[in-house]
Image (cartoon, rainbow, N blue to C red):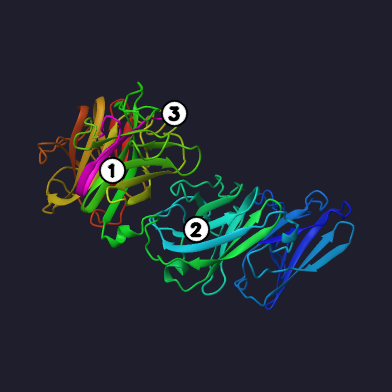
Amino acid sequence: MFSLSFSTSLVDKKIEEIELKASNPSKIWTSQGAGHNADLLGVALAKNPSDILNRKEGELKTRPLTDQNLLLFVTDDGFFSKEDRKYQIRVLFTDGTVFTNQVKVDSSTSTATGTSGQAIYPVRMSAFVKGLSNYDAVGSEKKIEGDNKPDALFVLTLETKDREITAIEIRNIDGDKAAWDTVPTSHNPPIGVALKSEPARLINNPDGSVKLRVQDKIDLNLYVADNGTVEKGKTDFRVNVAFSDGQIYWTRVEKSLVTSKEVEENPSAETRGAQVNFLGEMLGFFPTDAVGPYPEMKPDGKPDAVFGLDIDVNPKNTVTGIEINSVTGVTRKWGTHGTTPGSWGLGVAYQRAPTALLNKPDGSISIPIEGRTQFYLYAGDPGDLAETNQQLRIIIRLADGSYYQQMVRKALATTSTVAPEVEPGPKAKGLISCEFRGFIADLVNNSTRPGKDGYLDGAFIMKLQVDDKKLQRVDLMGPDGNVRWSSEPKAPAMFLGVALYPKIYQLINVKSGPLNTPVSGRRTIYLYAADNGLLSDPKSKLTVTVVFGDKSSLSADVIK
């Protein structure tokens, strides 16, 4: 990222082309597009760096008289960290005149354009790399979403007066190559940006860009998908910050005393030996009405959105707070009392007793936990949870002061209250979960008909909660989305045995055809399937779908 500033004394000319030439080693980038011995140079106004002006070949159609401050983006050829490399800028105007100048690369925390003397207030910056966090905000792809891997965390402190940050970049200055930024049109992975005071909420725009007004001082958490350079600890970095006035400031990143595998804001959590694993998933909607759009534990006359929390804690601890926050899009917050100020209430119940809330009268919780426990979380629906694609994050707080964060997973076919689909039908209002429990009985075989085959079957425990429905069919789908087992199979799908608790070894579908089984309230159902290799593979992803007599359905990912 380079900055180009023009003097207001220039006549009103149009720019036709901007060229950046490097030496030692030689390289050329041009705004006219990639061509012979040249790569593309992206040009944007400093006040809006996410809008590249030369997406198409041709004139830039920008004038120095009105657009004095430009940002230039180029793909790193692997030598930008060389301190002795030289750059020259060449600007060709439509009237044939040419402007050339050497690019000044500043060696201190100041502007790359050499215009810091024009600013009334200086910019002071410092940055630390704190290692790997418990946060998963971004991945190696350009979009802002997690990749189920812990992010590396950089902390940036910036002091200035009334400026607007328009872009942030992190790149290596030695060691292995690495670069991340907030520019949507670049080829670098993204940076997830959050205020240090609210580390669980990203403040990026939907396209990953940022526009941050700094009045005096700002402390930022910068999350990136580590390519190994942070965890290894042998690479040094710098942070570049571009402002709307065209100036770029940078600072060297210092190494924090706490690095690898750090728990953000709670570095002592791991040293105490705490082991916490959990999965948060949006399950859908159910007629249960425990909470509404207010902090108190009182209903609002509308069905609650329901989240599943599957958590394993060792050694014994106490859950003192649970909250769900939006990471992207419209701000939404749900939480137990005393967690996030201004949040709507969050009801908590054991899955084995889904209607018995564990919240105290003020909405707070104090739930002893040791080992694996499964909860339902009830949240008031703002009206679009079934439709929105925004990312949600669940945060668990424990009595020892530690907290743990993870993205909320959304099932492939979350239950919905919106308009029904044409196929396979509308989503029913209700709850569903399904867990693979291993190989425990021999009731089915690998054909389309019931019958034993001498081998233990894979067993699933499915929990279903609906009002006055008639269960017609149960399907199990493989990672490719195709039905692999069904209670009403058609080749090549195999037979899926269905049993109702407590008669877990007595199949209700010994004859072909619809199940025609009434379901009202909460039922536990056992499913049996012959292994085709997917059941014994711990990495295979399976999905269960139940279809009712009114053609509505419920689906959920299988927990292995």
Q: What residue type is labelled 3?
A: Gly
Q: In this rendered view, identify the residue nearer to me: 34 or 333.
A: 333
Which residue is under mark 2? 155
Q: In this rendered view, identify the residue nearer to me: 84 or 255.
A: 255
Sequence-first disc among 1 and 3: 1
Residue 434 rendering spot, x and y as whole percentages:
25, 42
Query: Mark 1–mark 3 contact, CB under 8 Å?
Result: no
Residue shown at 79% from the left, 54% from the top? 59
Q: In this rendered view, identify the residue nearer to me: 296 or 94.
A: 296
Q: Which amino acid does label 2 sit on?
A: Val
Could you say which disc has been placed on residue 133 in the image? none
Location of residue 280 (image quadrant): top left
Assign the N terminus to one quadrant of the image: bottom right
Q: Which amino acid does label 1 sit on?
A: Thr
Which residue is under mark 1? 320
Which residue is under mark 3? 383
Sequence-first disc among 3 and 2: 2
Residue shown at 57% from the left, 71% from the top? 173
Which stretch did the figure color magenta? 359-383
Q: How crowded is mark 1: few (under 14 residues within 10 Å), some or many (20 or more)?
A: many
Secondary structure of the residue carrying numbered label 3: loop
Q: Is residue 32 visible?
A: no
Queried whether the magenta region covers residue 366, the answer comes back as yes
Eye-nearest disc, 3 or 2: 2
Asked if 536 appears above or below 516 in the picture, the reply is: below
Secondary structure of the residue carrying numbered label 2: strand
